[in-house]
Image (cartoon, rainbow, N blue to C red):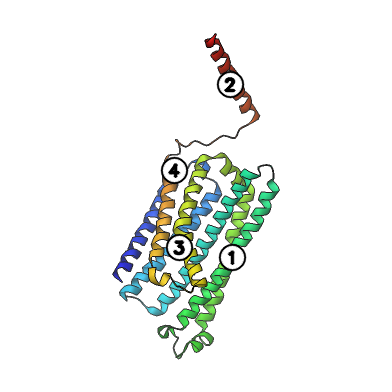
């Protein structure tokens, strides 16, 4: 138990450090390529993940040292854990869809209709997938707690009574499912609006925004998506519950991911004068560049003569 308590403690420290870095980055004057509302939404979802992680892990520490009220601890763990997984899954799917749309823009720069249709397909798919997965996961969690005798409501002695009679399990399933649906619709709408308006132009024209998304995507893939997808595949295909063995170590990788993303945002923002925005190439810019080339050629030929 002691190594797990240590890992959870380190995770909480990393999350508080991430929040501090994000706060400092916001207090400092932000580079205009990072002022787009898209990045505010991305950082907001990261902050929501961090908050739910901190609360759920503090409860987990209380569970390990047995200084808790089991009745309420179980309910809080279900609530914060569900919201946390919902945000993480949708956030990563939307981010991957966003980067995939940018790749499409590089391949088909003259076909804006493709980008719009791709966006309309990816974001609803991300919302529906995360909603269905969390609906399944939520049901498994509630059914799992319903089989623990210590969590049975007063007057119930088996899981059937706890599921049928106890209002908590019905209320939890309905309320958390509704919360997931609203959260997915809200996030999906925000991402759809932002991407359709100016996000594509922002990512095309600014080097810093591209750098931020590149490192953030790598961090999310290796520290969040890989552990979660590994657990999902092993538990679904081979019936191996890897999280039963590694436990909070997945929480540590997720916390480390949040810290890395916050640090990247902070240091990029601190170097805003170094990484200047890349200006779009216009016809006037091309004419000036051509004149410079001609002038350099004349000077070079004159020296040769």
Q: Are marks 3 and 4 in contact (CB under 8 Å)?
A: no
Q: Which is more N-terminal, label 3 or label 1?
A: 1
Task: Residue under label 4, please give it.
Answer: 268
Q: Which is more N-terminal, label 3 or label 2?
A: 3
| CA separation in Å, label 2 and label 3 | 52 Å
| Label 3 residue SS | helix
Q: Is residue 172 left or right of residue 266?
A: right
Disc ID at residue 227: 3
Task: Residue under label 2, please give it.
Answer: 293
For image coordinates 51% across by 53% down, the residue present is: 42
Is 265 drawn above or below residue 276 in the view shown? below
**Residue 169 can be seen, yes or no:** yes
The residue positioned farthest toward the left in the image shown: 2
For image coordinates 42% across by 70% down, the residue present is: 243
Q: Is residue 272 left or right of residue 131?
A: left
Q: Which image quadrant for residue 300?
A: top right
| Label 4 residue SS | helix
| CA separation in Å, label 4 and label 1 | 33 Å
Is 277 drawn above or below residue 114 in the view shown? above
Q: Position of residue 265 (x, y in %)?
A: 45, 47
Q: Are marks 4 and 1 in contact (CB under 8 Å)?
A: no
Task: Residue under label 1, please give it.
Answer: 129
| CA separation in Å, label 1 and label 3 | 18 Å
Q: Nearer the viewer, mark 1 or mark 2?
A: 2
Q: Nearer the viewer, mark 1 or mark 3?
A: 3
10 Å crowding of disc 2: few (<14), some (14-19), many (20+): few
| Label 2 residue SS | helix
Q: Are marks 1 and 2 in contact (CB under 8 Å)?
A: no
Residues 296 and 183: in front is 296
Q: Position of residue 204 (x, y in %)?
A: 58, 41
């Amino acid at each position: 138990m002691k190594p797990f308590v240590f890992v959870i403690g380190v995770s909480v420290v990393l999350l508080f450090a991430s929040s501090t870095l994000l706060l400092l980055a916001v207090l400092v004057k932000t580079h205009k390529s990072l002022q787009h509302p898209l990045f505010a939404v991305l950082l907001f979802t990261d902050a929501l993940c961090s908050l739910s992680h901190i609360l759920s892990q503090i409860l987990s520490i209380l569970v390990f040292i047995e200084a808790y009220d089991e009745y309420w601890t179980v309910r809080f763990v279900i609530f914060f854990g569900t919201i946390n997984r919902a945000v993480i899954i949708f956030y990563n799917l939307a981010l991957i869809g966003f980067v995939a749309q940018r790749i499409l823009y590089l391949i088909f720069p003259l076909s804006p209709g493709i980008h719009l249709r791709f966006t309309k397909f990816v974001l609803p798919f991300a919302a529906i997938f995360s909603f269905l997965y969390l609906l399944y996961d939520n049901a498994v969690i509630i059914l799992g707690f319903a089989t623990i005798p210590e969590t049975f409501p007063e007057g119930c002695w088996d899981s059937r009574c706890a599921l049928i009679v106890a209002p908590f399990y019905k209320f939890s399933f309905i309320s958390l499912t509704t919360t997931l649906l609203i959260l997915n619709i809200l996030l999906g709408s925000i991402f759809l609006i932002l991407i359709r308006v100016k996000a594509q132009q922002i990512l095309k024209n600014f080097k810093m925004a591209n750098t931020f998304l590149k490192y953030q995507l790598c961090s999310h893939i290796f520290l969040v998506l890989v552990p979660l997808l590994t657990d999902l595949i092993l538990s679904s295909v081979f019936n191996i519950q890897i999280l039963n063995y590694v436990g909070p170590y997945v929480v540590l990788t997720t916390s480390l991911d949040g810290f890395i993303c916050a640090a990247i945002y902070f240091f990029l923002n601190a170097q805003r004068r170094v990484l200047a925005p890349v200006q779009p190439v216009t016809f006037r810019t091309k004419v000036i560049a051509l004149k410079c080339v001609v002038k350099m050629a004349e000077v070079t030929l004159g020296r040769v003569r």
